[in-house]
Image (tube, coloured by chain):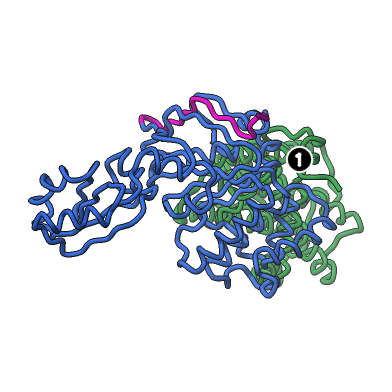
Chain colours: A blue, B green
Amino acid sequence: MSKPLISVRGLTKKFGDFTAVDGIDFDVAKGESFGLLGPNGAGKSTTMRILAATSTRTSGTVEILDKDPELFGPLVRAHLGVVPQQDNLDNELTVSENLFIYGRYFGLSKKFIKNKIEELLEFAQLEEKRDVKVEALSGGMKRRLTIARGLVSEPDILLLDEPTTGLDPQARHILWDRLFRLKEQGVTLVLTTHFMDEAEQLCDRLVVMDKGAIMAEGSPAGLIKQYSSKEVLEVRFGSDRNKEVAPQLATMCERMETLPDRLLMYTEDGEALLEKITHAGMHATTSLVRRSSLEDVFLRLTGRTLIE
Amino acid sequence: MRTAVEIAVSRKSSAMYAGRPHVLLERGWLAFRSSTWIPVVTGFLEPVLFLLAFGYGMGTLIGDVTTGTTTMDYTLFIAPGLLANSAMNGAIYDSTWNVFWKLNESKLYKTMLSTPLGPLDIALGEITWALIRGLVYSLGFLTVVTALGLTPSFWAILAIPAASLVAFGFASFGMAITSFFKTYQQMGFINFVLLPMTLFSGSLYPISVYPDWLERIIMALPLWHGIEMVRAFWFGNISSGVLVHIAYFLVMIATGLFVTSRRLRALFLR
């Protein structure tokens, strides 16, 4: 196996008494799409800033293409494309000017950038908007422009912090499609998200983070297989009844999680379980059988839901 | 065609400096092209209005002014002081409010520091941009003054490099101070200092009229050094005192650059 592009060992970041990242280890291989999944405050963004060579660490080692980002900041940043959580486009400039000047920050020649802009505008589906000030763009367009901007320097690694947070479903799907194309082109992606569907769509491999620590690591399918059952039966009996019936239901499945509004029953065959419950004389107000997701993995590992 | 990485390697970039402050000027020009000209015009007009109001208004009441052994027309006396003021205004305009905006609202410097640029690139680039504005203001003022026949001799052209030094000093120091401010209230402090300094630093009358203690305070402030330096070149009265003024501004520039780049690192690369 070739050497990983990113190698992190025992990474810790403290802000005063608060430990934001607590001794994490992971590697990212070339061409891989790697995700940090966890709720807000899990330490994902702090980790991303350290990878982006814009934040120092308290202890541990980080190597990006064999270089310590803390010692070789500008050199490491020359390898990276960064898409921050909040779009920080240059509002005083137009769409194409934003791409142009960002390339200049990397020292790229004007001629190179001019050609690159055409390619990126097409990629971001913003050809029509090239001479529009970025203030006038929709949230989805700004996001696509921010990603396009991160690609001006043809980076080895693209870092995306919560790429679709705050976007409507349609804009998210367009964005996923664009990111998927990058993945197909072999760009190494590192992204943070608290959306399990996003992680499932985009990540080859991911770590589940909570309170600054890594709880589990693997492919989305692998994690689901390891930490959850094939199917989940969600049942509601009404807020008061849920607790009453819970002990009896727990004996009928492999594992059960009691949420404030519903019960999650883990099983290999959801329909069969539902029939069994009905047979036992309990009638759920609503019921839903679905496949296990990363949300269930997170619930299993931490006892909490991803979005609270 | 060289890649971003090859460029970064060839520059031997340090953590503080990538050797590309000029891209800040490119960015400044792109933004300036499409922005409104009103603040530029008003900034330039301010010392011109001062010259008209005080020179031709008050000046007719005052008549001549005597400093040391020379006596001259009042309007002629205030022109170089206002030139120094003009250079300061231009430099301050960009290095305080515009920098404050880019630090705290648009987060432009944060974005730049996620690229291979270093804090010193940003400090040098932005200060140079502010210095250019100061230079443009003072050139404009010199043109007006020359048209009014107030330029004593061809040597007054030397007042322009002197005014550039004033602009550079204020741009550098202004950005350094601004990098510590987080709120608009704190920014108000800058105006609170600038207005009295502008009025009392001797552009409108010789500071020898002050009691000794006040004269000493004024002589410690940068604008007085700026005015005296510009005035010395303006009238061709070059003495060793000019070296003190030049040294004052060189220290101001160096301190400002040092503090600004350290602050940028502390704010965005910690």
Nearest the viewer among B38 and A287 is A287
Nearest the viewer among A186 and A76 is A186
On the image, the x and y values in percent for residue A213 come to 40, 33
On the image, the x and y values in percent for residue A298 come to 35, 43
User: Is any atom of residue A222 visible in this view?
Assistant: yes
On the image, the x and y values in percent for residue A178 come to 61, 60
Image position of A22 (left or right of B79):
left
Residue at horizontal 26 percent and vertical 57 percent from the top: A271
Image position of A305 (left or right of A122):
left
Residue at horizontal 45 percent and vertical 40 percent from the top: A222
The amino acid sitting under disc 1 is Val
Nearest the viewer among A76 and A295 is A295
Which residue is situated farthest in the right direction here?
B154
Task: Give the quarter of the figure containing the N terminus of chain A.
Answer: top right
User: Is any atom of residue B58 visible in this view?
Assistant: no
Find the magenta span and give its range.
A1-17
Residue at horizontal 28 percent and vertical 54 percent from the top: A270
Q: Magenta includes A6?
A: yes
Secondary structure found at label 1? helix
Tell me the quarter of the picture where residue B94 sits. bottom right
Residue picked out by circle 1: B5
Tell me the quarter of the picture where residue B141 sits. bottom right
Q: Chain of mark 1?
A: B
Number of residues whose C-alpha sits closer than 10 Å to that of mark 1, classed few (under 14), some (14–19) or many (20 or more): many
